[in-house]
Amino acid sequence: MTMTIRQTDRSQQASKLETAIADLTELAAAHKEEGDTLRKLPPALADAFLRHDVYRMLLPHDLGGAAMDPLDYLQFVEDIARVDGSTAWNLALGIGSSIFFGYLPPERARSMVGERECGIAGAYAPFGRGEVVEGGYRVSGRWGWASGVHQARWMVFGFTVAPPDGAGRPEARQALAPREAFHVLDTWHVSGMRGTGSTEYEVANLLVPAEMTFRMFVGKPHHSAPLFRMPGAFFGAAVASVALGIALGATESLTRLAASKRALPGRSSLRDQASAHYAVAKAQALAESASTHLRQSIADIWRAIRLDKEIALEQRMRARRASVHAAEASAEAVDLCCRAAGGDALFLSQPFERALRDVRAAIANIGLQRATMEDAGRAAFGLDPAWPIF
């Protein structure tokens, strides 16, 4: 009976996910230009996020979530990114940031995720300054990269606290607080990923209860669900999945262009050009192989967690380098498609210029830069990673 119930649950989850993918794909295609203009997620998509309860998809059942498999989550992000990178980016961080709830006392977290409007936005980098006060901390600071802030209910923010005795290094902590406590700034004027709303926010002298603070990926989660033991590399895989989807979408766009583009007099059509054949096949190989490698690296970590094993350094190294490799391979794939498309790639009526600026914006993420690959190389040489949440 238990097995039958579990199979039924999986079938229902798969059906709901297929419905969400179909709906969000259609809406993303229809509203991506609007997102560029608004410089945030369009209202139709923000409403769809709530309709499909995306912010609780990864959360365990006892927190009101769907307990989505992390690999299904990465595939979901990749699928939507084939149509629009900004929508997929908001989806990736909107879903993935629910991991922060696992670092709060379970009863506190449960009260925060009781409704679908429980999205988190913000940056856990310790750019703020904290002072120890009775019952918690008083925090001031300014942060950036708050993707999805306009539809978020909670903000995450990092800060440093001086040691009590004044000696040693400051301690970095993260915290959650209601969005209305912050001043959201209008600074998101960019070329790529315009529709993500990844703007800046600030606060002064915010009193944060101690129970709302934690040490992300360093401290121990309060909740026992396996999800909350996922390392920082999981976030890298999520944003790399956006880049992969953009690349795969570019190869599909090139295939459609080849079927319709007229040839100049005396010239072969794009469909008959060997250089275009190479470009589309190479781009597909880059994106597909990088996607497979990335998924396998996360699958290995997820398997270890579910078996209640420690995540080995080699597993973290593999996931980190797989994420950076996926991002770099995606950018190369989009470049190949744009070059093969020729002058058509310049026009706003074609999807190539959007793919080019969006994939470049995606790989600018801190978790996908060369320094992350270098950290994996340091570990390969037996050196300690420079990044504390490696």
Image (cartoon, rainbow, N blue to C red):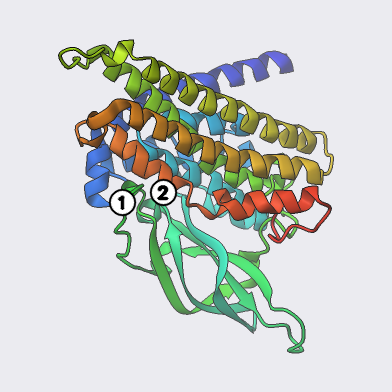
Q: Amino acid at mark 2?
A: Ala
Left or right of 383 on screen, residue 187: left
Kindly identify the residue that appears in the image at 36 percent across and 47 percent down: 193
Q: Position of residue 243 (x, y in %)?
A: 47, 38
- Up the image or down, 128 lies above or below 248; here it is below
Examine the image and state in which quarter residue 82 appears: top left
327 relative position to 314: left or right: left
What residue is shown with label 2?
361
Q: Are marks 1 and 2 in contact (CB under 8 Å)?
A: yes
Query: Residue at horizontal 83%, vertical 39%?
Result: 308
Query: 40 above or below 161?
Result: above
Q: Quadrant of the N terminus?
A: top right
**Image coords of residue 132 (percent x, y):** 64, 82
Drawn side of residue 187 relative to residue 362, left or right: left
Q: Nearer the viewer, residue 35 or 344?
A: 344
Residue type marked 1: Ser
The residue that appears at 72% across and 54% down in the rendered structure is: 221
